[in-house]
């Protein structure tokens, strides 16, 4: 018998999440039965903390539910011939150390995954955030060589891949992030221009200076005031991929805009929201492309690894506060 640890949402977040909003539970897992049921016992090795957990908790969860989320897990026991003991999978089983699955929702790591590559990358650059960058740029921004791409939260899991893929695609890339260390990192990984949006005197001036001709594509991870200023720097027929709105996730009172209609009309812009799950049928294509670029050294990955399952709430809160460089993950 295995006792799993799991983090539950004790209290709906009010404003910024606090560690007291979470509850650590112990859950006794039943033994796997013989005959008929093709079940598996898995143990989480790395767990992901992601911004979407904040808005989705409000939309989809009730107090007492186990926190939603994804992990890289190892098969510990198997009554299912499709998964051998010791295999690694990506699962969406929430903040749990151990869990039982029938295998239906498990994704094996790509068979070409090199032994030398950290498996945690399956939660980041070669996982959901990387796919978000890939499909958002190709299918929503429809970037073309020679164009200028703007991305915010640029040193994070999605943003850092957006910038590097745009460079591979022959674009000029401008990134913004919330600290000087992050800005230095962006320059190191090939961004043409980068600035600290927290310390510039004027966002308007900084965006103009980084690209006086404006932007063809804007990959927006932040929304709110940043997006309201950036929209005025779009070129005619520019494309805006609305990927995230992290500046609004912790608001108790919704922010009020400037509104987008006038720049949308006069510059004949396209603005499209998207969820990466739209391209689930092309997941393999995206993962193979990302894996190849990582192995070729064309896409660099940084991870912010927090040790210890008991530190999951803290890792989540720190990521929301911007204390992560690259993908925030927890190592059990
Ligand atoms: P990150 O790794 O980028 O971490 C979040 C970052 O957001 C922080 O590091 C911080 O960086 C920045 N941030 C936090 N608060 C603010 C704020 N008020 N204003 C500006 N920046 C802020 O997370 P991800 O890469 O995983 O996600 C980035 C965005 O993409 C999120 O909005 C997320 O919801 C969205 N997303 C959307 C998906 C989709 O399918 N549409 C899929 C995956 C992610 P800094 O120090 O620079 O402020």
Image (cartoon, rainbow, N blue to C red):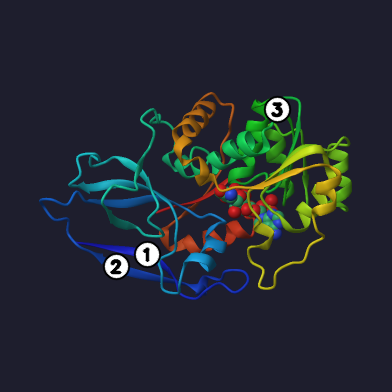
* Dot 2 alpha-carbon crowd within 10 angstroms: few under 14, some 14 to 19, many 20 or more: some
Verify CB contact (< 8 Å) between mark 3 and mark 1: no
The image position of residue 305, as x and y in percent, is 50, 49
Tag on residue 115? none
In this image, 296 relative to 65: left or right? right
Along the viewing direction, whichever of 213 and 328 lies nearer the viewer: 213
Residue 198 appears in the rendering? no
> Residue 195 is drawn in which quadrant?
top right
Total label count? Answer: 3
Give the distance between the C-alpha atoms of the residues marked 3 and 1, in whole angstroms. 45 Å
Residue at the image position 87 percent from the left and 49 percent from the top: 204
If the image is split into quadrants, where does the C terminus sit? bottom left
Verify CB contact (< 8 Å) between mark 2 and mark 1: yes
SS at circle 3: loop
Disc 1: which residue: 6
Q: Nearer the viewer, mark 3 or mark 2?
A: 3
Give the distance between the C-alpha atoms of the residues marked 3 and 2, in whole angstroms. 51 Å
Residue at the image position 51 percent from the left and 73 percent from the top: 21
If the image is split into quadrants, where does the N terminus sit? bottom left
The image position of residue 244, as x and y in percent, is 63, 52
Disc 2: which residue: 27
Disc 3: which residue: 144
Give the distance between the C-alpha atoms of the residues marked 2 and 1, in whole angstroms. 7 Å
* Dot 1 alpha-carbon crowd within 10 angstroms: few under 14, some 14 to 19, many 20 or more: many
């Amino acid at each position: 018998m295995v006792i799993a640890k799991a983090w539950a949402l004790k209290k709906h977040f009010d404003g910024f999440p606090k560690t007291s909003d979470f509850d650590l539970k112990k859950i006794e897992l039943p033994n796997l039965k013989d005959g008929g049921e093709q079940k598996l016992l898995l143990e989480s090795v790395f767990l992901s903390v992601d911004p979407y957990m904040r808005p989705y908790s409000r939309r989809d969860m009730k107090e007492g539910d186990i926190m939603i989320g994804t992990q890289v897990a190892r098969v510990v026991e198997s009554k299912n011939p499709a998964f051998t003991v010791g295999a690694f999978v990506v699962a969406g089983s929430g903040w749990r150390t151990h869990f039982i699955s029938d295998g239906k929702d498990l994704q094996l790591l790509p068979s070409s995954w090199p032994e030398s590559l950290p498996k945690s990358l399956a939660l980041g650059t070669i996982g959901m955030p990387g796919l978000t960058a890939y499909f958002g740029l190709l299918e929503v921004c429809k970037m073309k060589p020679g164009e200028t791409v703007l991305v915010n939260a640029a040193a994070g899991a999605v943003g850092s891949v957006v910038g590097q893929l745009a460079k591979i695609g022959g674009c000029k890339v401008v990134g913004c992030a919330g600290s000087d260390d992050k800005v230095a990192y962006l320059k190191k990984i090939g961004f043409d221009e980068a600035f600290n949006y927290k310390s510039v005197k004027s966002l308007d001036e900084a965006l103009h200076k980084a690209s006086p001709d404006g932007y063809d594509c804007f990959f927006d991870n932040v929304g709110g005031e940043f997006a309201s200023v950036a929209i005025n720097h779009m070129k005619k027929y520019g494309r805006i991929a609305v990927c995230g709105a992290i500046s609004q996730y912790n608001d108790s009172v919704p922010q009020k805009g400037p509104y987008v209609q006038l720049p949308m009309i006069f510059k004949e812009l396209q603005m499209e929201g998207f969820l990466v799950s739209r391209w689930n049928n092309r997941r393999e294509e995206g993962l193979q492309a990302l894996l190849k670029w990582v192995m070729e050294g064309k896409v660099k990955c940084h991870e912010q690894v927090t040790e210890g399952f008991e530190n999951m709430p803290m890792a989540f809160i720190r990521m929301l506060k911007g204390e992560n460089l690259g993908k925030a993950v927890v190592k059990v």
